[in-house]
Image (cartoon, rainbow, N blue to C red):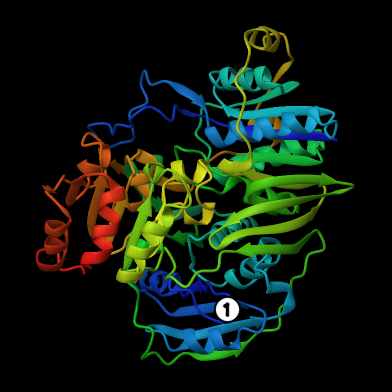
Amino acid sequence: MKVLVAVKRVIDYNVKVRVKADQSDVDLANVKMALNPFCEIAVEEAVRLKEKGIAEEVVVVSIGPKAVQEQLRTALALGADRAIQVETDELPDSLAVAKLLKGVVEKEQPQLVILGKQAIDSDNNQTGQMLGALTGMPQGTFASKVDVADGSVNVTREVDGGLQTVKLQLPAIVTTDLRLNEPRYASLPNIMKAKKKPLDVTTPDELGVSVTRTVKLLKVEPPAERSAGIKVANVAELVEKLQNEAKVI
Amino acid sequence: MSILVIAEHDNAQLNGATLKTLAAAKQIGGDIHVLVAGQGCQAVADEVAKADGVSKVLLADNAAYGHFLAENLGQLVADLGKDYGHILAPATTTGKNFMPRVAALLDVAQISDIIAVESADTFKRPIYAGNAIATVQSEDAIKVITVRATAFDAVAAEGGNGSVETIDNVVNNDKAEFVGEELAQSERPDLTAARVVISGGRGMQNGENFHLLEKVADKLGAAVGASRAAVDAGFVPNDMQVGQTGKIVAPELYIAVGISGAIQHLAGMKDSKVIVAINKDEEAPIFQVADYGLVADLFDVLPELEQKL
């Protein structure tokens, strides 16, 4: 079975995000970039499927400028076999990304496509589901457990009320939640080996997809600040304040 | 153009997030229709027909929709949604699951998790885990939107007079099926709907100690939540997690106990009206957003708090 994993290059999750003074966007100049944490979990899950002998090949794909090759190499160092970059300097929205991925799916014919449930920059939580609709594949989103059986996959999903399990016919789409697994660190020998693994470059044109956006970003602002309040000395004072000052109990 | 709102429910009762999504629809302006898709859900349709501002309820009652599978619901909503200007659903795990399929089938973008309506085509939404707020404008003919329910005040549940129309569209895919679910059973209010939420973090030390929180919660009629650290440490199940990747809450009173206040947790609760932090580390970042901070050992504070309430 072939597994395709889609990954995104985003701001490192430890970096404090700052909005540009002209409110045009957040400031990403000279900021550390990394593999989106949910995508890292997706790569790890695919590599584990290969280690269990369920998957034969793990192909990783990313969309963006040349810099995304850095994240593709990271995924290769974690154990993916081969990488594809869809090169564009545009910032495609989730629908365009899903259309590009559909093009890759048609070429590669994977049995399973694993994606992060959302990217920590745009927080859209859309791409996997959109790819499902465009390809007609069933989906198991927000996965905390993935069990591949003969011709199907059981996915346990984290839902508001607890957990839900669905059975999907392959080929299928899985999007990862935090508790699916704990990604490994890439070892130095694997980082060296990753440099020699194949990385192919294609373009939106070759895939026949236009990446125009229909949603315009008008403005980006910092959120309303919440100021620190007061310290109370003991429980009695806390209860008194909540009753008489805040009037919430 | 009319607005189609997709109701969130459990086949028996309407979820409160729907009334808040209706509030967003009212701000957009236009005739509001509500789709209730499920199995044996007539009561839900009758209930939402009474909500303020609803002119018509479409009831799709079929086993195919019983578990709200995205493959079925996405196609149904896309088929019905062609004639609307806006399609709205709450940004719950159900809404997040099927709405992007609707958008893709209609070949339009989706605008996720809006927190404000600026005009019929312009909305505000949090990005970067709430560290920035984007204002976005859609040029699509049909605007597919998920709504962060906590950002809107619910419309009145009574007083409306919508009609209920049964529709017989059945979409039943053969590629995805429901196997089972483990839903948390609780006598307490739902986290996202509770007036008061009390949450524990790594400082609780183990799952047993959450009983101390529960006793206080019982006095306040509160829901009990947890930080990601407490969930990852295995103290409590994931459905209790408050934060960017868990549940977003905005109660009147939020009490954070033994929670340091990581960005990811703050993103899930900082819109609460009053925040109380109880932590023995006075440097904990949670105190920077708390209205009332108490620097003390939670194992002393919780029993005393329970007693004084």
Residue B164 in the figure: left or right of residue A5: left
Residue B29, picture quadrant: bottom left
Q: Is residue B121 visible?
A: no
Which residue is at 21% across, 48% downward?
Answer: B290
Q: Is residue B143 above or below residue B258?
A: below
Count of marks placed on residues: 1
Q: Is residue B112 above or below residue B41?
A: above
Residue B202 in the figure: left or right of residue A192: left
Q: State the residue position of label 1.
A: B36
Image quarter in which the C terminus of chain B is found: bottom left
Residue A1 in the figure: left or right of residue A37: right
Residue B127, picture quadrant: top left
Front residue of A227 and A92: A227
Q: Position of residue A135 (x, y in %)?
A: 74, 49
Image quarter in which the N terminus of chain B is found: bottom left
Residue B285, picture quadrant: top left
Give the residue at the far right of this rendering.
Answer: A150
Q: Is residue A224 above or below residue A79?
A: below
Residue A13 in the figure: left or right of residue B178: left
Q: Is residue B210 visible?
A: yes
Q: Position of residue B16 (x, y in %)?
A: 43, 73
Q: Position of residue A159 (x, y in %)?
A: 57, 58
Which residue is at 79% across, 39% downward?
Answer: A106
Q: In which chain is the residue bearing label 1?
A: B
Q: Position of residue B298 (x, y in %)?
A: 29, 48
Front residue of A57 and B233: B233
Front residue of B84 and A112: A112
Q: Amino acid at mark 1?
A: Val
Classify mark 1: helix, strand or loop.
strand
Give the class, few, some or many, for how many residues have Cα within 10 Å of label 1's Cα (few <14, many ≥20). Answer: many
